[in-house]
Amino acid sequence: MLLLQTLSTTDPALAVDSLALMEGGQTEIGLLELLIKGGYFMVPLYVLFILAIFIFIERLLVIKKASKTLLP
């Protein structure tokens, strides 16, 4: 995952990669590194997010299957 940020400026020639300035030139951040930098609270939030997506897709498939079986 590539994460780039630029500072707000009106002149595009003066746009600076702020992430590169903070990290000493490194512009790529992995997902695990991003979660750790977000703090320990981010890991359970990520797990709950994945669980919510799984439940949503599973319920969607069950409802579609149930609606097809009710039709004559």
Image (tube, rainbow, N blue to C red):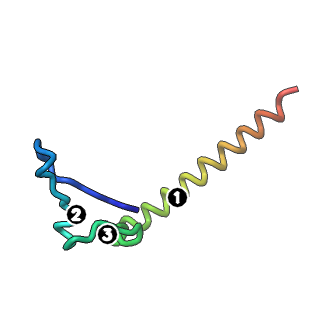
Find disc 1 in the rendering and name its residue.
50
**CB within 8 Å, label 3 to label 2:** no
Answer left or right for 65 relative to 28.
right
**In this orientation, which residue lies closer to the viewer: 30 or 63?**
30
Q: Earlier in the sequence, mark 1 or mark 2?
A: 2
Q: What's the amino acid at mark 1?
A: Ile
Q: CA distance from mark 1 to mark 2?
A: 27 Å
**In this orientation, which residue lies closer to the viewer: 25 or 69?**
25
Local SS, label 3? loop
Find disc 2 in the rendering and name its residue.
19
For the N terminus, the image quarter is bottom left
Q: Earlier in the sequence, mark 1 or mark 3?
A: 3
Residue 29: % across, % down:
34, 68
Local SS, label 2? helix
Residue 50: % across, % down:
52, 58
For the C terminus, the image quarter is top right
Determine the residue located farthest toward the right in the rendered image. Answer: 72
Q: What's the amino acid at mark 3?
A: Gly
Determine the residue located farthest toward the front in the rendered image. Answer: 13
Select label 1 or label 2 by which is in front: 2
